[in-house]
Amino acid sequence: MRVRIGCDLVDLAAFKKSLKKNEDRLLEKIFSRAELLTKPSKESLAGIFAAKEAIIKSLDLKVGSWQEVEIAKNKKGRPEIKFSGSDLKILSQDLSISHHGRYVMAVAVFLVE
């Protein structure tokens, strides 16, 4: 078993600027329909993006495999990770997303076989 950790930091102003330039293309490329269904704020989208990047880094997934990872909220509002098409043997996982001023940070921790 191994512990895998990934983190990502997003500058909210830069993220919003990127969205403004290519919003439709970026939304379709990075976020699942379920993630967009609730019409999240740009700040929430930045958190989901940071989470996906942290997960991709920690599990050595293919760069840009955003659609293979979906971030949802459980009944208590905590972020949860859903994978599609993955054969990873994940024994335990945890995800944290934090917003502070102009930055959004996510940390993903996995126990994998």
Image (cartoon, helix red, strand yellow):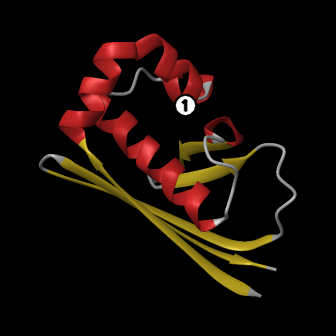
> Image point 15% across, 46% down: which residue?
102
Where on the picture, by quarter, is residue 4? bottom right
Query: x, y percentage for residue 103?
Result: 21, 50
Q: Residues within 10 Å of mark 1 (few under 14, many from 20)?
A: many
Q: Position of residue 85 (x, y in %)?
A: 84, 44
Q: Position of residue 22 (x, y in %)?
A: 39, 14
Image vertical order of residue 87 relative to residue 42, above or below: below
User: Observer-nearest residue: 74 or 27?
Assistant: 27
- Left or right relative to 103: residue 44: right
Residue displayed at 69% across by 55% down: 61
Q: Which residue is mark 1?
A: 30
Residue 54 visible to an observer of this rendering: yes
Look at the picture and state if 37 lies above or below 44.
above
- Label 1's element? helix
Q: Residue furthest front?
A: 63
Question: Which quadrant: the C terminus?
Answer: bottom right
Quadrant of the frame with the N terminus: bottom right
Residue 44 in the image: above or below residue 54 = above
Residue placed at 71% from the left, 85% from the top?
A: 2
Measuring 50% from the left and 59% from the top, which residue is drawn there?
A: 54
Q: Is residue 90 left or right of residue 82?
A: right
Image quadrant assignment for residue 60 = bottom right
Q: Is residue 35 toward the left or the right of residue 8 in the image?
A: right
Name which residue type carries label 1: Ile
Residue that protrudes farthest toward the top in the picture: 24
User: Image height check: is 108 above or below 68?
Assistant: below
- Tally of numbered tags: 1
Q: Residue furthest left?
A: 101
Q: Is residue 75 visible?
A: no
Q: In the image, residue 9 lies at what x, y percent? A: 32, 56
Q: Nearer the viewer, residue 78 or 29?
A: 29
